[in-house]
Amino acid sequence: MWPDGTRSAASFTFDFDAEEVWIGEDPANADRPGVLSQGTYGAKVAVPQILDVLRRHEVRATFFVPGRVAERYPERVADIVAAGHELAHHGYTHTSPTKLSRAEEESELVRGLEALRAFGTEITGYRSPSWDLSPHTLALLHEHGLSYSSNLMDDIRPYRLAHPRLVEVPISWILDDAAHFWFDGASWTKSIATTATVRQIWEEEFLGIRRLGGACVFTMHPQIIGRPGRLTFLDAFIGFVTGHDDVWVATTAQIASRA
């Protein structure tokens, strides 16, 4: 499945949500600058730092970006594209397709595609804002020329879906930074893990997937992984992964192409 000389694959992916993760959940949050400032940090501070880390390691990543974020921060998205990273679809607003009618979901898909294609790059992948799909999602992806989804958790290898040309690149909560680092300010019930704890969890999962010959897809968010201490962790962890000569580090689209 993987290129000659490699036994498994890994992909570093970033869901660049900025403020949209809060606005998409509740439009009333658009008038709450304190809440939104968490996402502003991702665009203002974290993305340039993450791009610098990736440059030093000569790693190409995949950035899943909502269309409204691309419209709000065109200079940041242009920087991502200029650095050679893959740009992929993450909704227009950060709204779960399970909350939308077919027509509304198609409108979100089309508007998001238009916003991302304005940067002159091919858009082939889709990740739902909620990591969930409606009964219409796969058909709409097929109809609008996308070639892969990265939303399901039922495998550790890319595989072909029922719709022609569509490939699934599986993900997992265990490899998502939000599951470990995102504090729940509304309820104060979720603690914040240390980078040492997350390093142990991710390293064990990466080595397990490597042993089984799968694809280890890390999902991160600039406003979360891009905090100063975590950037140091990210830098070291990318070095750990790329230090395995038998692991193919690739964009999500490149991994999808091997199915």
Image (cartoon, rainbow, N blue to C red):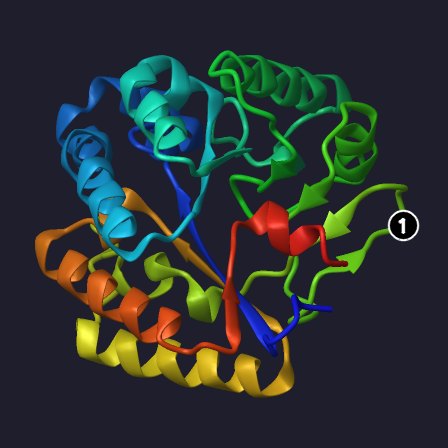
Answer with the quarter of the image where residue 36 lies: top left
Identity of the residue drawn at 29% across and 57% down: 57
Mark 1 burial class by Cα count in 10 Å: few <14, some 14-19, many 20+ = few
Is residue 210 depicted above or below 76 in this figure?
A: below
Judged left or right of residue 69, residue 103 is: right
Viewer-proximal residue, 190 or 235? 235
Q: Circle 1 — which element?
A: loop
Question: Pointer 1: what residue?
Answer: 162
Q: Determine if residue 151 is in view.
A: no
Q: Position of residue 211 (x, y in %)?
A: 57, 88
Identity of the residue drawn at 14% across and 51% down: 227
Identity of the residue drawn at 31% across and 65% down: 238
Q: Quadrant of the N terminus?
A: bottom right
Q: Position of residue 210 (x, y in %)?
A: 54, 81
Residue most extreme to the left: 228
Q: Amino acid at mark 1?
A: Ala
Q: Quadrant of the C terminus?
A: bottom right
Viewer-proximal residue, 14 or 48? 48
Q: How many marks?
A: 1
